[in-house]
Image (spheres, coloured by chain):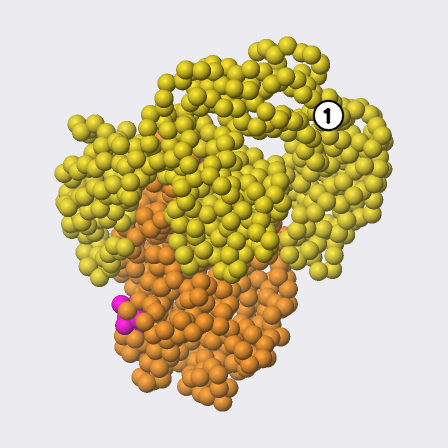
Amino acid sequence: MNRTRRNILLGTAAAGTAAIVLPQALAWAGNNKLRYPFTLGVASGEPTPDGVVLWTRLAPKPFEADAGMPSRDVEVEWEIAADEHFRRVVRRGKGVAWQVYGHAVHVELGGLAPHTWYWYRFKVDGHVSPVGRTRTAPAPGTSPEFRFGFASCASYEYGYYTAYERMAEEDFDLIVFLGDYIYEYGVETNHVRQNYAPPYPCMSVEDYRMRFAQQKVEPEVQQVHAAAPWLPTWDDHELLNDYSGMYSPYAWTDEEFALRRRNAYRAYYENMPLRKSTLPHGIDMRIYRSLDYGDLARFVVLDTRQYRDPQACRGGIKTCPEASDPARKFLGNDQEQWVYGQLDSSPARWNVIAQQVFLSAIDESAGTAQSFSMDSWSGYSASRDRLLSHIQATGTSNPIVLTGDVHAHYVSDIKANFNDPASASIGAEFVVTSITSETDGADARPTWPVLQAENPHLKYHSFRRGYGATTVGKDTLTTEMKILPYVSTKGAPVSTDATFVVENGVGGVVRA
Amino acid sequence: MKVKQYIAAAATAATVLVGSAASSPGHPPDGVAPEPVTNLAAEGVGGLNRIQLTWDEAVDNVAPDIYKVYGSTDPRFKPGRRTLLGESALTSLRVDGLGTHQTWYFKVVALDGWGNASDPSGRVTATTGDTLRYEAEDLAPVRSNTGVVTPNPMRGYSGTWSDHGQVFVQARTAADFADLALDLPAAGTYEVHTAFTKAPDYGQATLAVDGHVLGSPFDAYIPSGVANSGDVTLGGVPMAEGGHVVTLAPAGKNSAAKGFQIGVDYVDLKLTGTLPRDRTAPGPIADPVAVSVEGSSTLRVTWQPATDDVLVTGYEVFGSTTPGFTPSKENLLDTVPGARFDHAGLPLRETWHYQVRAVDGAGREGPLSGEFAGVSGDSLTVEGETMKQIATTASFAIQNNCCSQAFSGGKQLRFIAGKAGDTAELEFTVDMAGQYSVSTTSLYARDYGIVQFAIDGVPLGAPVDLYSAPYKLEPVALGPVQLATGAHRLTMTIVGRNPASPGFQVALDKLTLTLTS
């Protein structure tokens, strides 16, 4: 209980970690051979027309402070093939599992063919990893139809990862993850299962590594990574609930929070198939980036956590004039200008903004009073106004926003003026429910009747668990909102609860 | 706050470096260490036992990642594992928990993301002040009569708590209290300062050290909002090195106040002198009583503190079930720093006889109090998490406090049932045969089921629906049962679930058995 705060500053974190190290023989003892190190599976990500990032992290004992690895760098072989049996290996080489990065391996490959499926695996010390499947992006100037999945919020405690399993079965070309891949909490909820690694809130880099490992040893998590390349961004729980920039809503000194932020960001890099251009530097990690899928789609991936000011009016659902102060930072100036540049230079028909929190204004008060979530874009509404004004002024082609965070499906038209239902629809927002968070859920949240009445731009809602599946074509972008009846036990089937179509050149959604 | 944005430069540099063919095990793509940290400065913080270090960001070919701060009271110290004081991801670190009037020497080492370490910086020095600061939220709660003392880690209001946190005693009556443990590094005479939180539902707060109430009660009532009292000087107290008890308790409340709660931001101990030489033994304690604690068989022994020419360092509590007993090592129950002792784990309705005396810093003993007695209570509490698990068709888990609830003993037993018909059998023991009234205390949650309790195979009371959307922790009276001395079985059978609940699991915080005849 008292393993909170301050302990991390004066070196007791190491002692706390050591306490859960079991007295077993070292993995690197005697015969100098590693025990099986691919306990966390494999992954790929960041596909380009000629390349992809391959990932693994060596962890013979993922729940020990050193993950059962020796105190040195380890060379790892990789190979990538045009078939799943590796009869047609197209490239092989060696990478390094760097000790200082938790023995993570990030191989940045080039020289591959566009829009092509590949299979990859790693080898070290006679051990062979599971096989992952990945696909490069289509070449510039081409527009083949493709299909991506999107998801968020995968609390371990709240349920089983059946939604990941169903995503792995979908044949997606790409999976976009919108944050809350891990939750930093200790054992403090009362749900389907309990955090065990570590059994306290994450503080040190070793703690965060173990929390990632707790997710990644789950077979469904390994399956969904092995099924397709990922394009992930984070939200708050990869570090701390509801943090904003350098502000923690909890009793941390600035120095304590900064150290925790550095530890969390570092572990995130280590555990995701990211490019080395994303390498963290102390408390900073540039994760906003873009990725093109031929001429059809540009994915603009945002980070709405790292650069934002604290929530207005101390957070919550509020009527809060401070929220519209134009001086309040949300994306931060550098990212905001970068977003405009990405939209302006985009060759793509569909501009998919993958990010964390509700962009559409969602009034949560019945009647004439209005209140909004201070954690969402509505708590920084001038930033939203600037983005939407830019989109309208420059004529950004088909803006599509992907959102996570709220553990429920919503589909919304993005309005020129959210207070005027007659104003133009300038885009569409697809808010995806959680993989597990809030367990089985229900058909609708109790608040839905009010939200529906107050926000005519909201077209759909479900409070079940699930994910989104979007087919991107030349003329239409079709999104299926997938739901599962339960995650409190394994094995749930998936169904399509609703399908929405966005037509090229037409703002807003049409239910199919 | 110094938050350096490295983004633009770093991204470019890292990309180039990783392209280097030279990287191989032991040869990272970046082998260049940061340059030594410059402009390191050290300064005492407001007379406290804290030193604030600041420095300039290290120059590196990519970017610095983290800084390690080394220090010692020995000016010839070398940076190493034994002199590592902390790490910082900023260009500053406040070093806490030092002694008073100490001169410290510091050096800082910068590391980049690949672990390349700079040479140590130049050495700086600073001296601590005369005041030991304890953040109240960091003092460990050791005892309270209602289990409602919580370190409050939230940034609770727009004002500032020292280090953003307070300790919060959710007192509901003037009889409530919370004891917190404080470890003092050096003996001396200290002037105690604190800061209280003020709010409409806050009472008249007192703070005692080792049972001595310092100053007069602080009326923390304000008609609206939340505020901080600012620094309040409570008075001086001699204190020995080692463990002490800080007691927070309401003396009463303002007639306008809506509650008795207490919030404390910090406890400052300002060193005003050395401990005088102890020349005389402590005086007697006064008004000793032993009272049973409701809902348990615990006897709580309390008394008025003894006086001493310097200080009382502890109280020896002797006890026996035999009246007229002679206090000795064999019947010394405990030596406690404050004027309160909880005698737990007693059989029901057992009479205990006690004697208490004070001990001072020179090891002198005060006079024995004379014998007084108390009878332990009627109630036996069996914690769910400590009951012997006999059998289940599903699984058990022991869970720490959750869901904004404080479980008895800080834990509950979860019975993770998956369907109606799942059963769990637990064992408990009673030492005294008789008729008991039985109650269970369980968490209600939005995914909990309906449970039928039974003892020794006989159903007790009606099925209990543990579904509730807001969490709550409540006792349920199950009725009387005749129990022989020895082991008994408590069975939980899932009989269904509320239509609103998605789950069948249930939990047991504690079983309370109250002897009725």
Q: Which residue is pictured at 31% across the width and 39% down the height?
A: B48
Quadrant where the C terminus of chain A is found in the figure: bottom right
Q: Which residue is pictured at 39% across the width and 25% down the height?
A: B241
Residue at the disc numbered 1: B375
**Residue range (magenta):** A334-339
Find out whether residue A337 is within the magenta segment.
Answer: yes
Q: Nearer the viewer, residue B254 or B503?
A: B254
Drawn colour of chain A?
orange
In the rendered view, does A67 fall on the left or right side of B385?
left
In the figure, the yellow chain has which letter?
A: B
Q: Chain of mark 1?
A: B
Q: Position of residue A456 (x, y in %)?
A: 55, 82
Please tell me whether the stretch drawn in magenta is mainly helix, strand or loop. Answer: helix
Q: Nearer the viewer, residue B240 or A471?
A: B240
Q: Is residue A263 visible?
A: no
In the rendered view, does B26 fall on the left or right side of A54?
left
Find out whether residue A89 is within the magenta segment.
Answer: no
Q: Is residue B53 visible?
A: yes
Element type at mark 1: strand
